[in-house]
Image (spheres, rainbow, N blue to C red):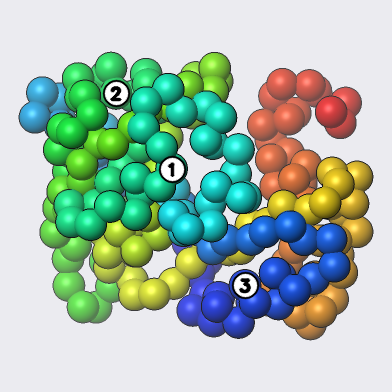
Amino acid sequence: MNTFTEYREVLSTVEKAKGVVAAEPFVYAELLVASAKHGPIQVTVKGVDPQRVGRVLGLGAYLTVGKLQDLASPEPPAVIVGDALAETLHVRVGDPVTMTLPKAVTQPSSGPTLAQTFRVTGFFHVDFDEYDERLAFASLTAVQKVLNRGDQVMGIEFTVTAIDLSTSVARAIEQTLGGSPYVSLDWYARNQELFRTLFGDLRP
């Protein structure tokens, strides 16, 4: 998993870039999630900034229960899950779930990661099985704690003033950051495999 620690400086640069509306740091993690009524299953958990995510992702429009601000809840940390995943786990709002790293994941030298308890605060439905069945959102700090890798993120995501500017804005940001090891991708490049599955070689 590629991560970096200097993300606050990069975030500041991105937020100041021409054409950028809002930005946030994030991390993806493949974790095992279990409930009181269902054993652990592997899902993708995205750690986001509760204060920024609402301006960057359109997730709020797909929430069927709860609100994005709930992700800022104190201990136990909150998690929002796909409605199909909630059915599989047999959980309702307020129920606890535990998250752990799969055993196959190499642990840092500081020692193994213990199971972390989260509280379900909402559900979403985007009508895409891979998301509704296997995706969850939690706060960035909560997911970092499960990963036990310190204050690191995988990247910075951002929205732009117009979708047709995404490629040029992404390139400008990459140049401002000095290029490698920083790489800036537009929305299509970031989700190319998904779009190929849905639309073949036609760019939507």
Is label 1 in a helix, a strand or a loop?
Answer: helix
Query: Which of 26/195 is in front?
Result: 26
Decide if residue 141 is on the left or right side of residue 116.
right
Contact check, label 3 and label 1, Cβ < 8 Å: no
- The residue that label 3 is drawn on is 11
Quote the CA–CA distance across marks 3 and 2.
33 Å
Q: Using the rendered view, name the quadrant where residue 147 is placed.
A: bottom left
Q: Which residue is mark 1?
A: 68
Query: Circle 1: is it few (<14), some (14-19), or many (20+) Cα within 10 Å?
Result: many
Q: Is residue 38 left or right of residue 181?
A: left
Mark 2: few, some, or many residues within 10 Å (few <14, many ≥20)? Answer: many
Which one is closest to the eye, mark 3 or mark 1?
Answer: 1
Compared to residue 176, the image places residue 21 above or below, namely above
Asked whether 122 or 167 is in front, the reply is: 122
Q: Are marks 3 and 2 in contact (CB under 8 Å)?
A: no
Position of residue 17 relative to residue 119, above or below, is below
Decide which of 65, 34 is in the foreground and name it: 65
The residue that mark 2 highlights is: 86
- Which of the 4 image quarters holds residue 180? bottom right
Picture coordinates of residue 74 (x, y %)? 23, 57
- Viewer-nearest of labels 1 and 2? 1
Residue 90: x, y in percent?
A: 19, 20
Q: Residue at x 27, y 64 (%)?
A: 145
